[in-house]
Image (spheres, rainbow, N blue to C red):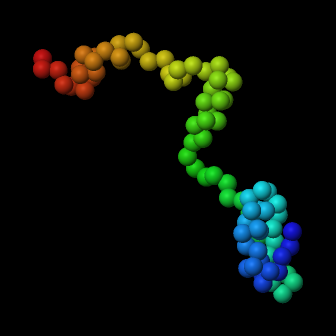
Amino acid sequence: MEVGLRDAKARLSELVAAARNGERVIITKHGHPAVELVRCERRGGFDFAKLEEDRRRLGIEGDGERWPQEFNDPAFSRQVLGLDDD
């Protein structure tokens, strides 16, 4: 959809809704394309719902790491961190 700048000012909410729905919205100035309204895509971060969905689909369980059982021992952790009194 192409809309003149003057008309776009009056219909901004409608044009934003159209762009959010994936429609191409071009605003013209003096009959020439000036800008295009586009839907903002989520940037950065993780989509944890999609991640969990993919993990289930691929049959991945747990955290994907195979840590030695001794790492779960608080005494071992104290030793590694140098917190033992010995």
Q: Is residue 80 left or right of residue 16?
A: left
Q: Quadrant of the C terminus?
A: top left
Residue at image position (23%, 20%) is 79
Query: What x and y, as percent, mark residue 60?
Result: 61, 21
Foreground residue among 13 and 5: 13
Residue at image position (80%, 80%) is 7
Residue that extends furthest to the left in the rendered view of this protein: 85
- Residue 9 visible? The answer is yes
Looking at the rendering, which quadrant does residue 64 occupy? top right
In the rendered view, would you say 66 is above or below 28?
above
Residue that extends furthest to the bottom in the rendered view of this protein: 30
Residue at image position (82%, 60%) is 23
In the rendered view, would you say 57 is above or below 18?
above
Q: Is residue 61 left or right of residue 2?
A: left
Foreground residue among 76 and 45: 45
Residue at image position (35%, 17%) is 72
Q: Quadrant of the N terminus?
A: bottom right
Q: Is residue 19 left or right of residue 69?
A: right
Query: What x and y, as percent, mark residue 48?
Result: 58, 37
In the rendered view, would you say 47 is above or below 42?
above
Q: How many marks?
A: 0
- Residue 34 visible? The answer is no
Looking at the rendering, which quadrant does residue 58 occupy? top right
Query: What x and y, as percent, mark residue 13?
Result: 72, 69
In the rendered view, would you say 57 is above or below 73?
below
Query: What x and y, as percent, mark residue 21?
Result: 78, 56
